[in-house]
Amino acid sequence: IIFIVLSIIYLVYRPFFITKIVGVSMDPSLKEGQLVLASTLDKNYTIGDVVLVNYDGEVIIKRIAYVPGQKILCADLGVRQFTPLPPMKDVKRQLDNLNSHGVHAFVYEIPENTVFIIGDNESYSEDSRNFGPVKYKDIFAKVVE
């Protein structure tokens, strides 16, 4: 009876997922083909968490890099719309300098109810740098480490 009850609870609430890593966007932390356990119970997402996200009809796995209210200095270099730049002194002057040389640079504030996600293997990851922040409601699980 206990097994049946636990099975019904699992089928209804799906508190855990086991998923297989596809691709190299999370190297070296998570290797292609590796199985990971993710929990739907912990909805307290913060910087550094690896999460499963429903994006554009598929499940992607990425790390949360920025949370709502954070401001990041970005540049649109033609490949990615949001390429975070390193911290700089005198941001206004640096932005003016970059923009005067044809680089679209700007300060971007992460909107409420969204997070900015980036793959650990940044060169081979399609993530928020390409498509912008994702909504909290699209995150459905956090990888248990």
Image (tube, rainbow, N blue to C red):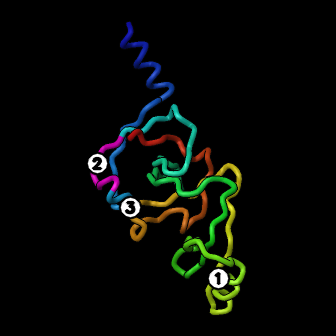
Query: Who is closer to the viewer here, 140 or 93?
Result: 93
- Across and down, in percent, residue 32 comes to 29, 55
- Across and down, in percent, residue 48 comes to 49, 51
Quick one: label 3 or label 2, which is nearer the N terminus? 3
Q: Looking at the picture, which amino acid does disc 2 mark?
A: Gln
Q: Residue at x 38, y 58 (%)?
A: 26
In the image, is residue 97 above or below residue 74? below
Query: Who is closer to the viewer here, 62 or 93?
Result: 93
In the image, is residue 131 above or below residue 141? below
Q: Callout 2 environment at 10 Å: few (<14), some (14 to 19), or many (20+)?
A: few
Q: Quadrant of residue 107?
A: bottom right
- Across and down, in percent, residue 102 comes to 63, 90
The N terminus lies in quadrant: top left
Q: Which residue is disc 3 drawn over? A: 25
Of helix, strand and loop, which mostly describes the magenta segment?
Answer: loop
The residues bearing labels 1 and 2 have C-alpha atoms spaced at a distance of 38 Å
Q: Quadrant of residue 89?
A: bottom right
Q: Which mark is residue 34?
A: 2
Verify whether residue 30 appears in magenta.
yes
Extent of the magenta region: 29-36
Quick one: label 3 or label 1, which is nearer the N terminus? 3
Q: Which mark is residue 104?
A: 1
Q: Callout 1 environment at 10 Å: few (<14), some (14 to 19), or many (20+)?
A: some
Q: Residue furthest bottom?
A: 101
Quick one: label 1 or label 2, which is nearer the N terminus? 2
